[in-house]
Amino acid sequence: MQSSRRSFLITSIGVASTLALSRQAFADAPKVAESDPTAQALGYKLDATQVDKAKFAKYAAGQDCSNCSFYQGKATDAFAPCPMFGGKQVAGKGWCSAYNKKA
Ligand code: SF4
């Protein structure tokens, strides 16, 4: 009993520190530039209000990275990694055509 509890705790600590480390690695990830080829392909803008609405008719006011299901940060984070850009950081106020509203 005692030892299984201990190994559970040790495992939990290991998982927590691995998560902390990967968050740290993410925080150092480079920011996506609008000139990046993937950004161009997905119509990524640092400022969602600058989205080319003629080209991306699916864009609706109020959509931005901070309320997209792919955004890997808190809604209040200025920048956070996005898997669409290989984990590079996108702006919370940004947008791209892979936008998917967070449930
Ligand atoms: S997928 Fe979502 S979080 Fe990522 S850049 Fe596009 S809108 Fe932003």
Image (cartoon, helix red, strand yellow):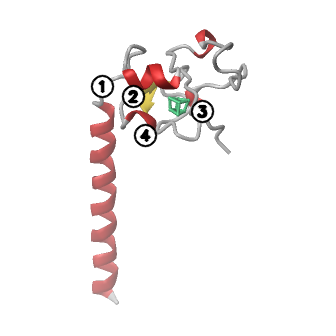
Q: Residues within 10 Å of mark 4 (few under 14, many from 20)?
A: few
Q: Position of residue 87 (x, y in %)?
A: 36, 37
Q: Which mark is residue 58?
A: none
Point out the tag, 3 or 1, that comes first from the N-terminus: 1
Q: Which residue is mark 4?
A: 83
Nearest the eye: 51 or 91: 51
Gap in Å between the C-alphas at discs 4 and 2?
Answer: 9 Å
Gap in Å between the C-alphas at discs 4 and 3?
Answer: 12 Å
Q: In the image, 63: left or right of 41?
A: right
Q: Which residue is mark 1?
A: 30
Query: Residue type at mark 1?
Result: Pro
Q: Residues within 10 Å of mark 1 (few under 14, many from 20)?
A: few
Identify the image quadrant of residue 96. top right
Point out the tag, 2 or 3, that comes first from the N-terminus: 2
The residue depicted at 58 percent of the width and 28 percent of the height is 97
SS for tag 4? Answer: helix
Q: Which residue is mark 2?
A: 89
Disc number lying in front (3 or 1): 3
Query: Label 1 near label 3: C-beta < 8 Å?
Result: no
Q: Is residue 100 visible?
A: yes
Image quarter (top left, top right, bottom left or bottom right) of the C terminus:
top right
Q: Which mark is residue 99?
A: 3
The residue carrying mark 3 has its beta carbon less than 8 Å from ligand 1? yes
Q: Position of residue 63 (x, y in %)?
A: 66, 25
Gap in Å between the C-alphas at discs 3 and 1?
Answer: 20 Å
Gap in Å between the C-alphas at discs 1 and 2?
Answer: 6 Å
